[in-house]
Image (cartoon, rainbow, N blue to C red):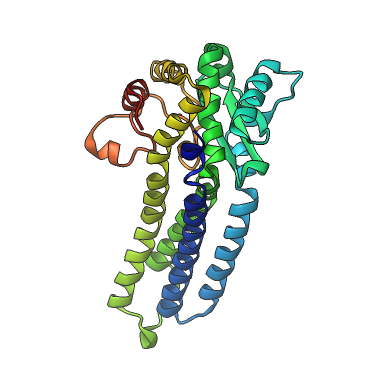
Amino acid sequence: MVQNLYTHQDANVRKTWLFMTAMFLVLIALGWLLTQYYGNTVFLYVFASVSIIGNIVAYWKSDSIALAMSGAKPVTREQNARLYRIVENLCITAGLPLPRLYVMASSQINAFATGRDPEHSAIAVTTGTLEKLNDNELTGVLAHELSHIGNRDILISTVVVVMAGIIAIVSDLALRMTLWGGRRNERNGGGAVTLVVVLVAVILAPLAATLIRLAVSRKREFMADSSGALLTRYPEGLASALEKIAHDAVPMHKAHTATAHLFIASPFKGKEAMSWFTKLFATHPPLSERIRVLRAGGI
C-alpha cells in the first residue's frame, strides 16, 4: 500500500513545477509576440506580471478557488460525525493528517480532494454521496480521495484549475486584440507572417493548457482507485460506489469545466458520449473500465 500510495509523490511535485514553468513561458511568449506585432513593450511587462501573479495564486490559493467554485461549505464533527469517523480511521491507516472536510449541496454522488500538500488539504463530498452510499461505499470513495492527497495528485490538479483558466483568458484577449485592436508595427516584424505566428500562438496556448489538464487527470484516477482499494482492503466498496455513480443521473448545478478533473467522476451527467473523440478529451476514464479493473485486482 505504501508503495502505491506514495511512489509518485516526488514525480507529481516535479510535474507541478514543470507545469507552472511551462505556463510562465507560454505567457511570456505570448507577450513577446504581441510586443513584436505592436512594437510596444507594455505587452511583455503585463504578461510577465500576469504569469508571476498567476503562479503565486495557483500555488497558495487554488484550493480555496476550487472549493468556492464548487459551492463547498465546511462541515464540523457535530454536523456529520459519520464523515469524520470514516476519514479519521483512514488517515490513521494511511499515515496522513486529517484534511479539512467540506460538503456540497447536490444530490449527485461525487467528491474531490484539493490542496497543495497533505498538511493543507481538503476533501469535499456532495450531500448525495452521504445520503446514497453505505459505509463501505463511502469509505471507498474517501480512501480514493485520500490517495490523491497522499500521492500529491492534488497539487498539480489544483494548480491546473487556476493556470489553465488564466492561459485561456489571456489567449482569448490576445486573439481579440490581434484581430480587431491596435496598430501593428510594420517596421519591427508586423505584417502577414507575424500575424499568422501570433494567431497560431494564441489559439494553441489554451489548447495546450487543456491537453495538459487532461493528461494529468486520467491515469491518476486508476492509481487512486488502486491505492484506495489497498487502503481499505476492500476494493468492492469503491467498485460498488462507482456503480452507483454510473447510474446516478442527477446533474450538478455548480459543475465547471475548470474543476471537473478534480472529481472522482465527471460531474457532467448525460454528456459522456463514448466516441473515440470524446474519450480523447474526457477528464476521466470510463467508469465501467475502472470498475472492471478494481474487481480484477489490477491497476
Q: Tell how many labels.
A: 0
The structure residue drawn at horizontal position 44% and vertical position 20%, both measured from the top left corner, is 235
Which part of the image, by quadrant, shows the C terminus? Answer: top left
Is residue 273 visible in the rendered image? The answer is yes
Q: Nearer the viewer, residue 97 or 43?
A: 97
**Looking at the image, which is closer to me, 88 or 184?**
88
Residue at the spot x=34%, y=66% of the render? 199
Q: Nearer the viewer, residue 4 or 201?
A: 4
Left or right, 17 with respect to 195, comes to right
Identify the residue at horizontal 58%, vertical 39% (top origin): 114
Give the image location of residue 136, x and y in percent.
52, 14
29, above or below 241, in the image: below
- The location of residue 220, given as percent across then percent down, is 42, 39
Q: Quadrant of residue 240?
A: top left
Where does residue 110 sit, x and y in percent of width and height? 51, 25
Question: As displayed, is residue 276 above or below residue 166?
Answer: above
Asked if residue 133 is positioned above or below residue 195 in the image, the reply reads above
Residue projecting furthest to the bottom? 187
Q: Looking at the picture, how far across and down is residue 3, in whole percent?
A: 48, 39
Q: Determine the residue located farthest toward the right in the rendered image.
A: 78
As drawn, is 2 to the left or to the right of 193? right
For this view, does 195 lie left or right of residue 62? left
Say which of 77 and 8 sits in front.
8
Residue 112 visible from this viewpoint: no
